[in-house]
Structures are given as C-alpha cells and as structure tokens.
C-alpha cells in the first residue's frame, strides 16, 4: 500500500472520516460457512459547487478532488480488511447536502477519477455498483455491493448501511466506498449457471 | 454468550470549526450484538447467574478490540447497553454496571475512573449517544464528549447491544476553562 501524507484528508477538503465495520458471527442462529467482514469508509467533504448553476462544468473540481478521495477511502478499507486480496465485493455511494445538486454527488463517484482508482486499489475489474441521495445530516444510506471481478456472482449481492451522524451539512457531500471479504452469510439461491429458463409461461394457469 | 455481530466504528475529525485538528481526533467504538441472557424467562429476580455467564466475557472481548481500533493511547472512555424491545433496561445495566465488565477496559487503558454510560431500550436502528470522560480524572472538562451510533439491524427484541467507546484526546478545538477556575 502506498504511504500517504497524514494531512492528505485535510488537503482534499475532508472534515471527517467515518469507518464502519461489521463481522457477522451468526445469521439465523448459525455461523456462516465463510466468516465475512464488511466495511464502509465515508468522508465528509465541502461541496465545491455550492451556489453554482446547472450549466457549471464539474470536471475541473472532480479531477482535483476525486482521486484523493479514492486514495484516502480505500487506504482505510485495505488497512482494516487486510489488503486487496481479501476484498471480494465492492460498492460506492455519495450523499449530497440539501444546498447541492444530485449531479454533484454523481460527479465525485461516477467518473474514472474516482471509480477507476477505487477499482485499481481494490484490485477489481467489475463496474462498481452504487447508491446516491440528497439528504440531511444523519440520514442512513444502503450501499449495494457485488463481486469485484465477476459482478453477476449472485452469492455476493449484498448491502451495507452507511451513516455519518453530523454530515452532510447543506454545503457538504459524503463520499463512501464499501467492501466485503466474502458472500452473504448463507447464500443458497443458485446462480446463473444453475438457474432453469424462467419465462412468463410459469404464470399460465395461475389465478389472478 | 451468543454473539450475532461485532461492529467497529472509528471517527477521525480532520477539521472542526473550519480549522485543522492536528493530529486528527480519533474516537472508536466496538459493539457486540448479543442474545439477551434473560430473554423469554419472564421477570427474573436474581440476575447474578446471567451476569456471571456474560459480563466478564463481553467486557474482555470489547476492551481488547476497542483499544486496538483506536490505535493510540486511550484518554477518555465510556460504555453502552441498548436493550431490545422485549427486555428490561435492568438487563442491559446488569451486564455493564459490574466490575466484571468494566475492569477489562480499565486495565487495558490503565484507567481508574468509573465509565460513564448510556442505558436505553429501543428498536433496531435506534440512535444512541455514548458519553466519554477522562480515564483517570472525570473532572477534566476538555475530555467530556460523546459519540453517536445507529446500528441498522440491532438490537432485535431479544438482543442487547453492549459497547465500549474510547477517545485518543479530548474534544477537537477544546478551549473551555478548567473546572478548578470556577471553584
């Protein structure tokens, strides 16, 4: 892992970083066959576009901010999960404060300046699934994750809830990266390779 | 002790009041979501067998983990018991208001004071705040602080969330006069 300056977060306009992690020991009373650790890291940043109109070019600030956010967030994920080789599923999210535009949230997570770097640092190849929202501080957001190299791996479809108690303020954006070291606790709903061919014909004869 | 999940939360405050916090202020919480030892038993008069079976074990688990999660010497600390809707507040208090629980954290943090606490009953997803005070002198005003948590799917009605919180410093930008200046 690249060593970064401890003041990098401040340079990126980050006010606060919240790292949440959960280990599932029991699900429905039984230990998962594969012990899994799931985590989110959320950074609260100033919204660089507050007060600008919808015609504003978002690229310059995105190119400046998003790569540093990707570095800071994934550094903390990798440190706690034990490195990129431990990460099997990933996701991302952003919550823009009420003075911002939903496009501002998208700008920080949906371009290569963020997504490509997160994918590279977590050693994945899939498109990264996401959630975004505009909300008051303290609003929880459910972040979807899927497999980092084979996105359609059904056992790895899962979500994790992220929340910052005092962010985003109206003029801030919360940016999140999520990762999991494995599948859902008891995955048993098949996969594309085992599914029968299902069409609407299965409804024939069903009463309305 | 039946533990469903272990949660770790670490907050780093990089700036506060628009000014840098150097080094970034760190507060960590580790929470265990456990089955309420008295679930489904009606009113249990003597809580001691459940305390004996659970309090020390969960205290040891959380103390080691929260010190590790903080990654710095502990200067302030606190504890929490959040009881699911089918339990009594007394069940949560039973597990955290005993030296069998808190002494693990005091020893790990070289602390001497009582742990400030929150005890509350609520549904899964209830928001709660854990108060923290200085580990050797609870009158040190700079270290009075709290951290807020919300666990998306805990506690279930028959569960209790037990948590320990640790801070590596006082409040970011703390600048209040000490208690002694008013005495």
Image (spheres, coloured by chain):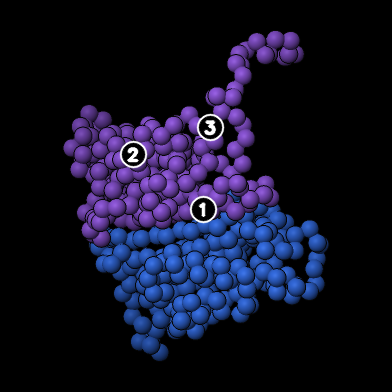
Chain colours: A purple, B blue
Q: Earlier in the sequence, mark 1 or mark 3?
A: 1
Residue appearing at x 54%, y 67% in the figure: B62
Task: Give me the C-alpha separation between circle 3 and circle 2.
Answer: 20 Å
Decide: is B166 above or below B10.
below
Mark 2 element type: helix
Query: Disc 3, disc 2: CB below 8 Å?
Result: no
Task: Answer left or right for A142 relative to A169.
Answer: right
| Residue position for label 2 | A119
Query: Cα distance, mark 2 to mark 1?
Result: 22 Å
Q: Residue drawn 63% across and 58% down?
A: B3
Q: Do discs 3 and 2 share a chain?
A: yes
Q: Position of residue A68 (x, y in %)?
A: 25, 47
Q: Is residue B123 left or right of residue B127?
A: right
Q: Please give the residue where the numbered disc 1 appears in the rendered image.
A: A22
Q: Is residue B84 above or below residue B117?
A: above
Give the residue at x 41% y 34%.
Answer: A149
Mark 2 vs mark 1: in front: 2
Distance CA(mark 1)–CA(mark 3): 21 Å
């Amino acid at each position: 892992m690249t060593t970064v300056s401890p003041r990098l977060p401040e340079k990126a306009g980050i006010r606060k970083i919240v790292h949440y992690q959960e280990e599932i020991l029991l699900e429905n009373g039984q230990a998962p066959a594969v012990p899994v650790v799931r985590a989110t890291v959320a950074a609260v940043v100033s919204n660089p576009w507050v007060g600008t109109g919808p015609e504003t070019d978002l690229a310059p600030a995105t190119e400046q901010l998003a790569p540093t956010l990707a570095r800071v967030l994934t550094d903390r994920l990798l440190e706690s999960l034990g490195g990129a080789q431990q990460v099997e599923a990933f996701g991302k999210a952003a919550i823009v404060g009420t003075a911002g535009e939903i496009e501002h949230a998208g700008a920080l997570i949906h371009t290569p300046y963020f997504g490509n770097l997160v994918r590279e640092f977590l050693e994945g190849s899939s498109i990264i699934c996401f959630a975004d929202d505009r909300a008051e501080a303290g609003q929880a957001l459910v972040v979807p994750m899927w497999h980092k190299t084979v996105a359609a791996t059904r056992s790895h479809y899962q979500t994790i809830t992220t929340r910052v108690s005092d962010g985003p303020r109206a003029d801030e954006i919360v940016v999140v990266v999520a990762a999991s070291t494995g599948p859902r606790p008891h995955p048993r709903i098949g996969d594309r390779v085992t599914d029968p061919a299902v069409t609407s014909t299965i409804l024939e004869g069903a009463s309305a | 002790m039946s533990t469903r999940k272990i949660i770790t939360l670490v907050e780093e405050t990089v700036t506060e009041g628009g000014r840098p916090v150097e080094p970034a202020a760190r507060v960590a919480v580790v929470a265990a979501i456990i089955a309420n030892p008295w679930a489904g038993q009606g009113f249990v008069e003597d809580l001691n067998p459940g305390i004996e079976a659970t309090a020390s074990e969960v205290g040891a688990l959380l103390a080691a983990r929260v010190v590790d999660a903080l990654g710095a010497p502990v200067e302030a600390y606190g504890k929490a018991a959040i009881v699911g809707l089918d339990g009594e507040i007394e069940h949560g208090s039973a597990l955290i208001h005993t030296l069998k629980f808190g002494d693990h954290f005091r020893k790990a943090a070289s602390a001497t004071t009582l742990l400030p606490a929150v005890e509350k009953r609520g549904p899964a997803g209830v928001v709660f705040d854990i108060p923290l005070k200085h580990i050797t002198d609870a009158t040190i005003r700079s270290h009075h602080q709290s951290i807020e948590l919300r666990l998306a799917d805990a506690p279930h009605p028959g569960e209790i969330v037990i948590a320990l919180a640790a801070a590596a410093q006082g409040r970011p930008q703390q600048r209040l006069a000490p208690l002694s200046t008013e005495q």
